[in-house]
Image (cartoon, rainbow, N blue to C red):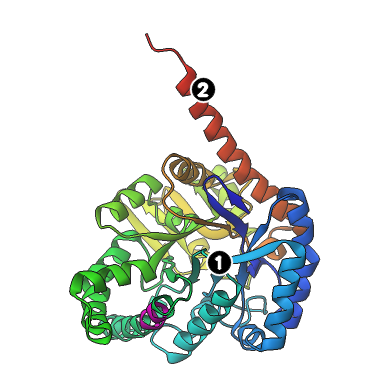
Amino acid sequence: METSYGHLTYCSNIHSGESWEDHFFQLKKHIPAVKQALSPNAPFGIGLRLSNLASLQLSKEENLTAFKAWLDAEHCYVFTMNGFPYGDFHEATVKDKVHVPDWSEYDRVAYTLRLARILANLLPRGMEGGISTSPLSYKHWHAKDKWNDVIASATLNIVEVVVQLARMRITGGPFVHIDIEPEPDGMLEDIAGYIDWYEQTLVPVGISILTDKYRIDEQEAEKMLKDHVQLCYDVCHFAVAYEPPQGVLSLLKTHQLKVGKLQISAALRAVLPAPGPARAAVVDAFRQFDEPIYLHQVIARKGDTLIHYPDLPNALEDADNPWVSEWRAHFHVPIFLDHYGVLASTQPDISEILQLQARQPFTRHMEVETYTWDVLPEDLRTDMTEGIIRELQWVKDTFETVQSARSVSRERPVG
């Protein structure tokens, strides 16, 4: 749905269904009720996630035509896509396979370009579209002395996508960008790594290719890159890395880099007391979130340094480490709660980023991404449609609170 601060939706990776038929069934089951609750009198935007299989099936003219007819009938539109998970996202074990194939493999290029063609067919006239995607690769797959080779290969493939997206735009098609999504243990996992890759690798490689391909100067080529490769700011991921929203946005502004999509998500966090019963209670609470499907990286604070655990079980094994004072876990929990018993969430980071967006919008695309409803501890599970509505309403209410506070501030007499 369109708000005063940009388009707001939720990501359909919450729904099972790796074939288009199954996923479309889920959309038809949930979207109308969500729209009725949140946007009954205006079009409702959809954040569409397609597996590779579903993208192949939706590329068929008869399926695309039927989907467009359904969107029109339901007064819905698609403005953003999640192109990170390529394969099955609801199978018994996803874990690090969420990065397969990585950007060093051509299958990732073909998949992303297919999503772009689908999105170009679905976008309302004059609206930009975005596709969030993997942070190049997963670090633990590669020996450290091979990282530069992987990054170089991945960058060339991303530039190939830029070439095609630019051609689409130049020839009268819509403006579509890919939005790189850093996350812990990704080849790009924090804002410093993203900016370094962008300026030291992507820009030089991209300028060389784009100036030759389109006979443009270096300044035009750099602008083309910065238009078509943007950041997917996943609030959960940056919070797990202890990166405050204002700091991230300030760095992006300094380096003149854009945010293509804000993924509104919350992580788990807790201060760890000294060894004893209170600490054991916190660790036991984290243990309730240890499930076998998704990867839940943990970053711990140890004084002024950070310790990275590849997954929650690794952190649990080191729970007695007396020097560790805080854990943050990559587990997307419902954004409308700030506490889960003795655990807290990183909801304050969401509140801060939404305030910053309200004051000076830095993106047009906002997407709530809580995909863990089926693997939450039993006492936190709820009806999926109800959960989606509560999350989106919480975002709308937060924006309204910010707007009310600004109005009061403007009306308050001076002196």
SS at mark 1? loop
* Residue on which the image places disc 2: 408
Question: How many numbered dots are placed on residues in this image?
Answer: 2
Q: Name which quarter of the figure residue 180 lies in.
A: bottom left
Q: Is residue 166 magenta?
A: yes
Give x and y (percent) for residue 166: 38, 77
The type of residue carrying mark 2 is Val
Judged left or right of residue 94, residue 152 is left
> Would residue 341 be seen by someone viewing this image from the given angle?
no
CB within 8 Å, label 1 to label 2: no
SS at mark 2? helix
Give x and y (percent) for residue 14: 67, 66
Nearer the observer, 310 or 32: 32
Give x and y (percent) for residue 12: 65, 67
| N-terminal label among 1 and 2 | 1
* Residue on which the image places disc 1: 125
Q: Residue at x 59, y 36 (%)?
A: 400
Q: Which stretch did the figure color magenta?
A: 161-167
